[in-house]
Image: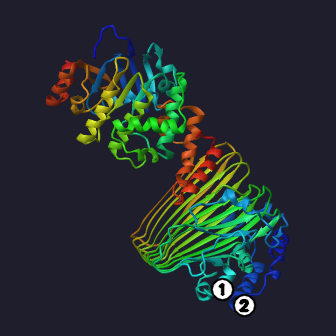
Amino acid sequence: MIRDNAPVILDVRNLSAKVGGAEILRGISLTVRAGEVHAIMGPNGSGKSTFAKALAGHPAYEVTGGEALFEGRNLFEMRADERARAGFFLGFQYPVEIPGVANEQFLRLAYNTVQGARGKDELDPLEFDDFVREKMKFLDMDPRFLERSVNEGFSGGEKKRNEILQMALLEPRLAFLDETDSGLDIDALRIVANGVNRLLTPDNAVVLVTHYQRLLNYIVPDYVHVMERGRIVKTGGRDLALELESRGYDWVGAKAAA
Amino acid sequence: MSTATAPFLEHLLAGQKIVAAEPAAWVNRLRAEALECAHQLALPTTRDEDWRFTDLSPLYRLAFRPAAAAARLDAAALAPFAVPEAAHRLVFVDGHFSAALSTPPAAGSAVAALPLAAALGPHGEVVHARLARIAEFREHAFRAVNTAYLHDGAFVLAPRNHGEAAPLHLLFVATQADATAQPRVLVVAEPGADLTVIEDYVSTHDGAHYTNAVTEIDVGANGRVRHVRLQRESRAAFHTATAAVRLDRDASYHAVSVAVGARISRLDHHVVHAAEGTFCSLDGLALLGGRQLADTHSFVDHAVPNTGGRQLHKTVVADGARAVFNGRVLVRPGAQGTNSAQESRNLLLSDRAQVDTKPQLEIFADDVKCSHGATVGQLEAEELFYLESRGIGGEAARNLLTYGFAAEIVGHIPVPSLVRALRETVLARTGAKE
């Protein structure tokens, strides 16, 4: 929902970043206000995932220029864990498997760490168990996923649901969901999308990084941005996504270059 | 024999003459031969290739005597080591069978579990056909010493086609300081039998003692044995051990071996795929701190075609501790169709910690799939970032990942109460928050 007077959550200006010595982001700018849903689309290699990881603070991504303000604070002066505690959430394209660590143990530690940072009460194991099971219902997740190791042996769809479960627990101000739709069949896509929709409020915001417009049938964006070679080359409403679906990306780039 | 090790061996063997003769003449002959070997064979030093990284001289400086007959031990002292899932247990106190503390299956039960000496009567032929034939002692001083003391070991027999759901607990308790024990185990799974055995070494004191164990496991055709081996002795103890396994056609063997105790420990884990269609999995974990050293030498012998093996050995090494792993895999000529995967993963938690890991693949057949890998180092960067992206930073993240690294192996143990107990141990050692 677009409101002109809504507070700015994320303000990225002219961001450049390198990974492995190669410059992937070349002066990208993006402003996200509370209540908004943004979609970033673009061909493979356009820098969508790099943008997400650089904002989240992945150590392999080196910021070489520009700035990013998160609720007025300089994001790049914060460690990755501080960004998360401040309310920035990255939904991973490829959620990491952590053998040996039970999912519930991980979820509880993350939840309590973030709660503690917000000056709110932590939950003991029993309280947390009740709490997380409620959240899992909305995502149609089997409680057995609590006992299993984090993401280990989960199917693609189960991993993505686990990401949205984490988003539900941590209640971020801004969720950057990187290709959350990839690897999902239509039923799983609907469940994950409904999960995200439920979490949207006028006080938070979501950025969907996606290759296809399919997800946007379920989570309706206020803005659609097209990324190419490390920059946003076009911004429009949800109609842009439909146009991209039928015409591909080439015409956008051709126009931008012209 | 080298002069440095002579007094140690002399003390070690001093008690042998008090072991009573058995009614079965073959046992007496076996002991005599083993004693002869023990006197002839040199105890290993770091000059031996197989012991290059494991210096036993702190052990050789000691003059431990064989432990006197079962010291009185209160059953309550064993409460911390209870395994509720185990319907039966045999308890050995300082190497001596304790009838008072044991709960063996009643005579006539499907599975037999009794002291070796008592098994010689009813199961003499089964024992004779296997004892000291799976773990060869003629070239190995420690096995020879153990065999010279043959008397009081544990004998476990699962009969043909019997599936036993409850694990069997073999508990070896060290109660006396400065004493030695020579535990011996023979497990026989007849064709089609299915059995879980927990071999558990513990101490009731913090002092030094020496355990020299030999375990033999024979898995008959289509049989399955799950073997949990726990070495959680005093951190001042010394522990040398062999676990030798023979697999008959289509048999399988799944081992999880955990070493958290002892000042110096060494396990030689041997598996022979003696017939086609066999499979073994060997999981290992050494969790070390202080000045501990744990050495695992595994040897998987693919002697015939179409056998498979999987191995994951992990070590977590803190302070000035040291872990040694040597994973030998032999694919003999003609053993086509062998499928073997070995992985050694090691985590160093301090600058002084040390790991020596060596895969040793000897492949003499061409139609095989054999992989191996070894990593030594720090935590996985991607895992660390994943936790950080959820707000879990710094020490809490590192502790949780260290815990998970070790707990993965613990999670493979097929006995839930042991999984819980060992997770507590891992939590305590890694500082992770519950």
Mark 2–mark 1 Cα distance, whole angstroms, equals 9 Å
Residue B23: mark:
2
Q: Position of residue B126 (x, y in %)?
A: 58, 85
**With respect to residue B63, does B127 lie above or below?**
below
Residue A201: mark:
none
The residue positioned 38% from the left and 26% from the top of the image is A175
**Image quadrant assignment for residue A171:** top left
Tell me the SS state at disc 1.
loop
**Image quadrant assignment for residue B22:** bottom right
State which quarter of the image contains the C terminus of chain B: top right
Q: Position of residue A130 (x, y in %)?
A: 46, 37
Label 2 with label 1: CB-CB less than 8 Å: yes
The amino acid type, in three-letter code, at marker 1 is Leu
Q: Position of residue B175 (x, y in %)?
A: 78, 63
Query: Which residue was labeled with disc 1?
Result: B120
The residue positioned 60% from the left and 86% from the top of the image is B123
In primary-sequence order, the first of circles 2 and 1 is 2
Q: Between residue B353 and residue B68, name the one nearer to us.
A: B68
Q: Between residue B89 and residue B430, name the one nearer to us.
A: B89
Q: Between residue B391 and residue B318, name the one nearer to us.
A: B391
Say left or right for B213 vs B388. Answer: right
**Image quadrant assignment for residue A183:** top left
Q: Which chain letter goes with mark 1?
A: B
